[in-house]
Amino acid sequence: MLLLDGKKLADELKQEIKLEVEQLIAAGGKQPHLAAILVGNDGGSLTYVGHKVKACDTVGFKSTLLHFPDEISEEALLAEVKKLNEDADVDGFIVQLPLPKHIDADKVIMAIDPKKDVDGFHPVNVGKVTLGLPAYVSATPLGITKILERYNIETSGKHCVVIGRSNIVGRPMSILMSGTAKTGNATVTVCHSRTKNLKEITLQADIIIAALGKPEFLTGDMVKEGAVIIDVGTTRVTDTTTKAGWRLKGDVKFDEVSAKASAITPVPGGVGPMTVVSLILNTLKAAKNEVQ
Ligand code: GUN
């Protein structure tokens, strides 16, 4: 069984990006700049944004964190998005999701200039990715394709089962896996909460991408011998033996599934670190004006 070590790969990619940033600046270019909007104090969101800011420091990017209280109005948030759209020093920015209920997240995403939408959430980027045109691919799916690429996982002609149809992971992942890029050309089945006979389908999968957000959902009996398993789940479960009082659990029952899999991502240390580095890669693209 091959452990698909996202942490190690992310560290390698950050070192490569750091060198490229140094060269960019030495050649008279500007320091890449990522901004993040965070609303409220959701524990997960605070942690994720913290990782993103730290990664900027590691690779030599400038970062700006704009942290607003839960009560910020939709209008005020849209005004902040507009300011970042117009700030020539900011190459790309994200609005961390979820947003409080009184704010329409779709409206906020659609207000982002697609050229600065390094999360790849704007319909223009989603549409371009669907058409196979140059665009920002959202960070988690991009990170997963990098794992498949760097570990030479064959995807062409394979049956890939994606569990979950979210706008952030499942949907874009299914589009990429069936596309014509190097880590595509798979036959893709998208499963979700209304899918019948899920186990029958997962047992036919050469590659399973579990992105439904239910801890330890995918068990050993649902997986074919030799399958490749990508675990996108990051649910915090109570654990009184840890300092924080919780620990992360993936969507895959690791001990059972790893006994059958040919390759598998761990949680933590699999897809999570690759998501962060993919956002950094998208910001570098933005700084180099590679997406129009
Ligand atoms: N919430 C969960 N994942 C993400 C992500 O990749 N980007 C943003 N902006 N919010 C998220």
Image (spheres, rainbow, N blue to C red):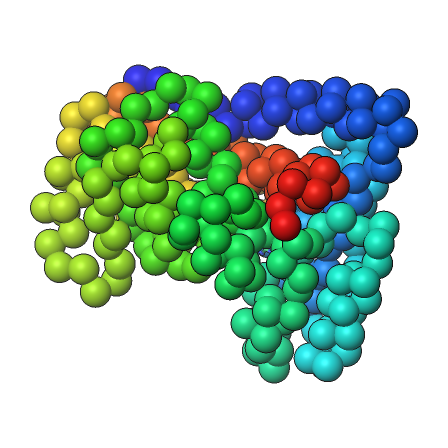
Name the side, left or right, on which 198 lies relative to 275. left
Q: Position of residue 280 (x, y in %)?
A: 66, 38
Which residue sits at x=72%, y=60%? 37
Q: Quadrant of ligand 1?
A: bottom right
Q: Is residue 66 placed above or below 253 in the rendered structure?
A: below
Q: Is residue 258 placed above or below 272 in the rendered structure?
A: above
Which residue sits at x=58%, y=27%? 10
**Residue 143 or 245: which is nearer the viewer?**
143
Q: How many marks?
A: 0
The answer, for residue 136, to whether it is visible in the render is yes
Q: Is residue 246 placed above or below 159 in the rendered structure?
A: below
Name the side, left or right, on which 153 lies relative to 68. left
Q: Quadrant of the N terminus?
A: top left
The answer, for residue 172, to whether it is visible in the render is no
Q: Is residue 29 placed above or below 191 in the rendered structure?
A: above
Q: Position of residue 163 (x, y in %)?
A: 29, 50
Which residue sits at x=40%, y=59%? 166
Q: Position of residue 215 (x, y in %)?
A: 37, 49
**Residue 216 or 274: which is nearer the viewer?**
274
Which residue sits at x=55%, y=40%? 275
Which image quadrant is residue 273 in? top right
Q: Position of residue 96 (x, y in %)?
A: 63, 59
